[in-house]
Amino acid sequence: MAAFFQGINPVLPIIFITGIGAISLFIAWWTYSSLSSIPAHKKGALIGLRAVALFILVLLLLNPFISRLFTDAANQRVAVYLDNSQSITIERGEYDGLNTYGEIIAEFERSKSDEIEFDYFLFDDSITRSDELTGTGVRTNINNVVEHLQENETNYLGAVLFSDGIITQGRNPIFAAQNLSVPIFTVPVGDTTDVRDIAISDVEYSSITYSFTSQTIRAEIQQTGYEGESATVQFMKSGELIESQEIDFTTAVSSHIAEFSLEFNEPGFFDFEINVPPKEDELTDQNNRYIFNIEVLDDKTKILSIAYEVHPDVSAIRRFIATDQQNELVISTWINEQTMIGVDPLNLSEEPDLIVLHGLPPNGSNVLEWIENQQIPVLYFATPSAFSRLGDSSLSNIIGFYATGIQNPIDVQIYHGSGQGSHSLLELTPQNYQRFPMLQTFRGNYRLSPLAQPLMFALFQRSETDIPLLIAEDTSTRRKAAVNAFGWYRYQQSTLDEAQQFYTQFLSNLFSWASTPPDRRTLMLEPAKPSFTENESVEIRAELFNELGEPEPEAFVDIEIFSGDNPEPLNRFRMNHLRNEIYTAELGNFPQGLYRIEGRAVKNDHEIGTAETRVNVSQSSTEFLNTKRNDDLLISLTEITGGLFISDGDYSGMNEMITRRIAEAELTDTREETFFLYQSIIWFFVVLTLLSVEWLLRRSVSLP
């Protein structure tokens, strides 16, 4: 330790400080100058004591301080990084997993120099300060090790890296190692023999599908070392084998695709598994199994088509319904009071999703009363004879309008009313309707129900009329739409492509809109991919529509994650809005298992919708796809940084290199401490002592 007088605070010229000393001496001399009877030596002592005491007091008022410099030897430390990933636990050949790994570390402990301090770190996809090996890391990121050493290279003389050199995450560490100024000593661990392994590397499927549809599941199978052999790929549903395929391996390393077809007849969540039975000498069976689930939605629309008149429109529209595989068509044709061809609407075993009326039933019909009492959407298509029955005002409860004063039929064309573009039914490709085939309707006084909205009108002889051709009504319980014209079969038979395109688009909009209930599914959740592994961050996507069926970008979508049947959520997240109706959330990594995700969308304290989905997280097979030790990488790290590749357990070279670095470098730490003199009580006792000695001398010469 070295201490020296640093200066005075505030800073004053030396001549000024010297002046203070001179003034102190002068005051002391002047005090005793008139006393001639005192011996000279005692008089000089009194003047000196008084001058020193006065000088100290004045000097302390100027706040002097002392700076002390401390020079210590720096910590002579080396960082030790231990690979804690799953690949180092593989037991194969002469390598006995963690047992062999522990023996290598024990040999290092016995051989390391006592003059050097070692700090231990575990690494997989992150770095933690510890020396307790578990071998549970699902990724190996050696680049993180190099970057960690670079950030702390002023604290370490070098680093010892125990690893198999197999990178499963991050960049190649060779590039970052070029910027290091300290050496890396690598110690290889792991197996060096070639492996034989079969792995299910990927499975392609749609996590959401619909009832009464089919789907093809594609599984990619990779193998190493089984040339000339074969394997069985099993496809299982809820633990039961439903199909299997044999795959022949014709080369030493190959990739194969196994396909399985599925048909879904009912809605719900279904668990599936693709499994390859392990072979006796296989490296691991942890990558021979892939579990996933599929949500089947009941999206078949059951449409009851009731015709009260034989007309070409009826068959044309029924053909259109039947061509869509999402529709289930139920036909009922009224002949007379005693005869119905097809099903009886009053005796249906299952309620339809949509009722399509071709014409109107006769007055007093039980079917009319049944339709009015149901909360089933209704889509009405006019037929010629139906206009004579439109005078009943109660019809507005079923088809949204009624009419009086029906006159003669007229040929008309379509034109949009003032509501053009304001309704989803009018989302049609712009057309020149005057080129299209003629439709027919009747003149009359049309009266709409309070909630009904006219969307299209009749154009008669190029003149606009108030005859509604398309009427829509959307209530809280069901939707109704009425097409007040007939002759649509001409559009289907037209040679004009635009007319056929309009016909298809118009009917598609009608059936989609009418069959969608007011409480339709507004929030939809699904994983970004069918399945995730433990080393992948789970991503959830959502689509949100408001009650009008429009994209909703301004809501809050909160999700909760549940494991199995546990009622308590593991975590909660708020999704981020991406664009339009799309929301996303990154949930982070999860261990292997099946997770339930529940979502809730809220806007202005009003719940828009809820949804649920499933996420499957499988065990990462990345650490087991390649387990052969990568000595080339470990050697390259030592060559770039000036270290050593230690494969024989001889650590003497490492100890010598580190000792030499200690001797060559100025490994010292210097620190400075500032001490203000007035803070020490010793000055109180010094001044008190000086004044006391002065008083005793004064008493000795009989001075007061």
Image: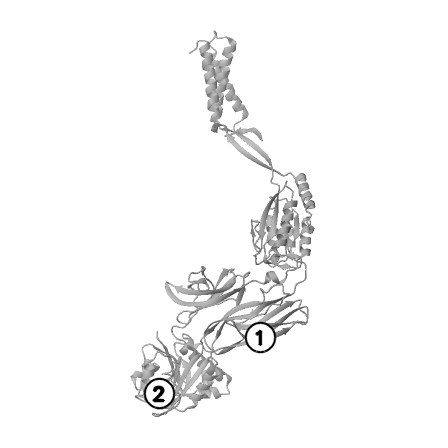
Q: Position of residue 246 (x, y in %)?
A: 61, 74
Q: For the residue labelled by badge 2, is the local secondary structure a helix, a strand or a loop?
A: loop
Where on the picture, by quarter, is residue 695? top left
Q: Position of residue 508 (x, y in %)?
A: 45, 80
Q: Position of residue 537 (x, y in %)?
A: 53, 61
Q: Amino acid at mark 2?
A: Leu
Q: Which mark is residue 244?
A: 1
Number of marks in picture: 2
Furthest residue to the front?
280
The front one of 641 and 35 is 641
Q: Is residue 490 above or below residue 135?
A: below
Q: Amino acid at mark 1?
A: Ser
The front one of 63 and 175 is 175
Q: Which mark is residue 360?
A: 2
Q: Which mark is residue 221?
A: none
Q: For the residue labelled by badge 1, is the local secondary structure a helix, a strand or a loop?
A: strand
The front one of 597 and 12 is 597
Q: How many residues crowd mark 1 within 10 Å: few (<14), some (14–19), many (20+)?
A: some
Q: How many residues crowd mark 2 within 10 Å: few (<14), some (14–19), many (20+)?
A: many
Q: Is residue 355 above or below residue 160?
A: below
Instruction: Please indicate, yes or no, whether residue 247 appears anywhere in the rendered image.
Output: yes
Furthest residue to the top?
37
Instruction: Please indicate, yes or no, whether residue 158 appears anywhere in the rendered image.
Output: no
Quarter of the picture containing the C terminus is top left
Q: Disc 2 versus disc 1: distance between alpha carbons? A: 55 Å
Q: Residue at x 46, y 20 (%)?
A: 688
Quarter of the picture containing the N terminus is top right
Does 38 sit left or right of 166 as displayed? left
Q: Is tag 2's residue or tag 1's residue first in the polypeptide sequence? A: 1
Q: Nearer the viewer, mark 2 or mark 1?
A: 1
